[in-house]
Every structure is written in C-alpha cells, then in structure tokens.
Image (cartoon, rainbow, N blue to C red):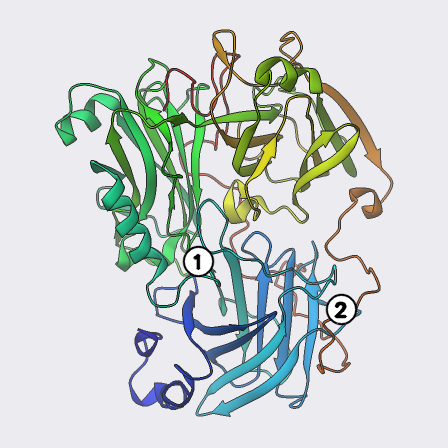
Amino acid sequence: VAEAYFNGLETSEKAGYTSWLNTNFGTAYSQHSFLSTASASGSGAAVFWKINGDEINFAVATRATGWLAFGISEAGGMLGSDVVYYETANPDQIVDSYIMENRAAPLKDDCQSWNLISKTISDGWIILEVNRKLDTEDHQDHKIVNDAGGFFAPTRLIAAWGDTLSMSYHGTNAARNSVRLFADGSVSVKEALVTKLTNAAAGFFDVTENNYQIPARDTTYADICKTADEILLGIGVTETPLTLVGAMPVISEETKAYIHHFTVYSQPSCSVDTLDRSMIYAWTPGDEGWALPDHVGFPLFEANNRRAIFIEIHYNNPDLVAGQMDSSGLRFYYINGERSERAAVLELGDPTVSLYGQQINNGLTQYEFSCPGACSSGVLQQDSVTVLAEYLHMHQTGVRMTNEVIRDNEIVHTSKADVFEFDQQGAFLVQQEPFEVKPGDAFRTSCYYRDGADFGLSSQEEMCVAFVMYYPAKAAGNFPWMCPYGLGIPVCSQELGRFDLEDAQGLDRVFGTSNGKCTGTGDGGPTDIPTLSPNVNGTVDDGETSSSVRAGVNTVFFTTLIGTSFLYLTGGL
C-alpha cells in the first residue's frame, strides 16, 4: 500500500522514496498512513511509525528539497499543533516547536523533546526520521495516547514542506490526516471496523450525495437528507424499532481530497431551515467511523421529531477544479430490536441558543455555564452513567472551550479544546477515555471568544454547546436529561457568568505554557525560528480553508426547546 502513495508521480520520480521504503518498512517501521493535500494531484506526505515502550519513532517522506515540518495537531489544522521541523539550511538540527493562534511562525519549545534519527535528502525527496517519548510531560507538546478504538478520537497529524533552504510560506504544500497510532498493525482500522459492524448488524443504509458536482470555488457547503420513510423503504423494513450500532464514512475515492469535513444531524424532516436538529456525528479525514459497545445502541425513528437524517458536507477546492462529481456521505449499521442499554446525549451550555441576538464583547471574553449537582442527583438518583464521548462546539470567533465535571467541589474531569478552530471540524471530538458521571456531579461549560459576534444559528454567529454522549439514557419526567441555559427547568437550569479578559493569560490554556519539565529532552538543539512569508493581504496564511462563506444555507448546530436531545429517550434518532 505504501508503494502506491504519491500516485501522481511517475515511477522514476518516486525512486528516492521507493528505495528508502524497501530498506526500512517492516524493519524500522510497522505502520503507515498518507497525509493528503487539498489537491487531487496525489501530493502529500507519507508517515511511518513504530511504538517502542514509552517512545515512538516517526518517518515522514515528501517531495521537497528545502524543509519539512511534521506535527501532532489538536483539531487537525495548524493552530494548536505540536510541530518538529527540519531545514536543509541547518542540516544537522531539528527544532521542537508549537503553534498557538498565530499562523505567522512556530514558537520554539523551552524543552527540545525530539531526537533526530536520520534524514535522507535524495532525488527531490526529504525523508525525516525522528523520535520522542509518548509523554514528554511538557505542556508545549501533545501527549501521544492510546487511540486504538471505541469512541476514542484518533490522533490528528499534519505536515508542510517547501523547496527553500529555510522554512517559508508553504502555500498548498500542506497535508493532514487522522490516524490510530496504537491500532493493530496486522489489520487496518477500517477492515477491523467493517468486520465488527458486519458481524453485529442486521444491515446498513447509506445517506450520501448522488453525483454532486463540486463547485469550482474555494469553499462550499452542500446538504444531503433522507427521511425515515425513504430509508425504511430502501432497506425493506416496515416496522421499528431499529437500533443504530455504528457508522462509517462513505468517501468517493476520486473526490476525497476535496472533502474537508462533514457533520450529521437527526431532525424531524428534510427542511433545511429547521431549528429542531441534533448532532449525530462529525467526520474529518482519516476517521474510519465508530462502533458502540456491544450492549449499547441508539433507537432509530421512534418519535415524530426524529424522522430524517441530514448531512452537511464542507468541500475544500483551493485549486478551483471544475467537473468533480462526489457521492460521499455516511453508512449507518443497525439491528432489529433493541440492545440492553440505550445511549443518549446530555446537552450543556446553551444548546437552545437562549442568548440569541446578544452581542459578545470585543477582545477576549469568557462565558461560563454552570449546571448544579442537584440536576444529576435528581435525574440519576442512585445510578451512575458512562460517558463515551464529548463534542465541544463553538463557531468562528471561539478560541478555547472546556467542559468540567465537579464532584464535592473538586474538578474530577476536564475535556478541552485549548486552541479551538471551527474550520477544522465544526465540532471538536475530545481525545479521552470513557469516564463516569455520578449523582451529585455538577458541570461547568466555558466558552472563550476573541472579538465575538452575536449569538445565533449561522457559522458567522456564535454558540456554546457541549454534547456529552453517555449511557444508559436517563429522563427527567417525560423529557430526556438536559441542563440548558435560559429555559428555567426546575433543578436542571444553568447559571451564566460573563467575564471580559485582560489578555491571553485569562484563557487559562494548558497547551503552550511552560511547566519547566523536560523529561523527554531530545538532541534537536537550538536554532533561530524562521518567519513565514505573508500573503498578498499582509496576513499569514497556512493554506487551509478559513473562509466562512457558505453556499446555500448557514451552518445550524441547534437543538429544540426542552423536548429534544441528541437522541430522544423514547424517540431515538
């Protein structure tokens, strides 16, 4: 498979890469993936890795002659990434660096945690081999965690390169992918997931585009929707209940380079403008899908307010290529009947957008929503629930978001997006293990904005919602468990604190801070940090899509008043 990477090149052009591959793969490295650019040319970076105890070795190969940068990204883009780079101007050094909100230049780590194993500069190729500890205990590095499966978010990798002797603006020479570094190398993540879901499910149905022509413009949002009647007719089922047990993306091979991400919702009908919708899934490149635990499932189509599945795809076409036809979307695996546990989603923050129309102040601002422990006490009674995953959601002006669980006045769990970047995912799936919420636990959801817009429904306006996927599903009377701001639900009603922050210190970020620990110190050595080149507008651009222009409809990430949750306790999707 790795030999087929860089399929836009002739065999002779790949000679330097092929020679290295034949020597090293299977011995020095056991697993690999390809980080694609937003171009259909087959360009990108091949990444190889092998985990050895508490360390990991990486090799990164790309078509370049000047420099190469490789990073572990929080959200999948340049911002909030942990980067190591190599320049032919400094042939015996690598630099451990990190990037916050400023795209202009990476910042040199206080602790140089990467080791240079070797570099190959040959026939128009740079192949960089580096090593570091999985956990360097350095807040300017991202910890590499076991991402093998379940609902655990994959690891997001990025790369950029160029032909100048020192790092400069990369243009379209930037690539990304999401991988599972700890997955069983003997079988691909996709193959293992297909086998698991095929064995568990009675069948599947697809909600996909049908030869949609991708416009020749930089950014496009396109919509797909199917009603329950259409879906049930297609699979030959006339009676419910059906239960969702997993889902996998269906990505057209010819057009996969243009698909930036997509989000999936359940809603009453296929009306684009409905306010009654809840998120099912947010997909980004490299994510192979998910399977619920064997005893857990989501009921399908049991209630009138969950009678359609709606997908919004973000296409990225920076080269303005015309005539590309796409049929991507999502495959849903289901069983007949139910599993022993129903899953649901607890919505925190302001899921009903009760702050609609209110202006966020200029500068840095924090909105803090607090759900009291009395809410979980009343709903859970004596039972605990297991959280499978958390999605954190804001829009364009959001810069950081956290969701905390507080028990006996102590924070026992924090999910966070330290450097939030809406353009990368729409919703941020936190990389974390499942955890328990107990009766009496309180929640605190904090959203931080820079020069914020009005609160509202479109991607040009703002929101603050944490979607907490858990089981078994719980109810408060006839309604699913929720704790929204502004609706005045007895016991389960959030309080709001608003704070103007003096400077970036008030964001309370962990990533990027110096904690004085250099346990994973490498031999990268000090060097001056280069400055990236500005674009014609005088700002620095990383080549990623940052446009908030929509084609058609505004992004709506909204749930209904009181009666809706991601999955209705008795209604499902």
| Residue at 15% from the left image edge and 20% from the top image edge | 238
The amino acid at mark 2 is: Asp
Is residue 440 something one can see in this rendering?
Answer: yes
The quadrant of the image that shows the N terminus is bottom left
- Determine which of the numbered discs, if any, sits on residue 109 in the image: 2
Pick the residue in front: 283 or 297: 297
Residue that sits furthest to the right in the current view = 502
Q: Nearer the viewer, mark 1 or mark 2?
A: 2
Q: Residue 208 in the image: state x and y as whole percent.
A: 27, 40
Residue 66 to residue 417: above or below: below
Residue 109: which quarter of the image?
bottom right
Which is more N-terminal, label 2 or label 1? 2
Q: Residue 27 in the image: state x and y as whole percent.
A: 42, 84
The quadrant of the image that shows the C terminus is top left
- Determine which of the numbered discs, if any, sits on residue 261 in the image: none
Q: Is residue 368 left or right of residue 266?
A: right
Is residue 372 something one can see in this rendering?
Answer: no
Q: Residue 9 in the image: state x and y as whole percent.
A: 32, 80
Residue 552: which quarter of the image?
top left
| Residue at 34% from the left image edge and 64% from the top image edge | 40
Q: Residue 457 in the image: state x and y as whole percent.
A: 54, 26
| Residue at 82% from the left image edge and 30% from the top image edge | 499
Residue designated by label 1: 318
Residue that sits furthest to the left in the current view = 236
In this figure, what is the number of numbered marks? 2
Pick the residue in front: 172 or 528: 528
Q: Label 2's element?
A: loop
Mark 1–mark 2 Cα distance, whole angstroms, equals: 32 Å
The amino acid at mark 1 is: Pro
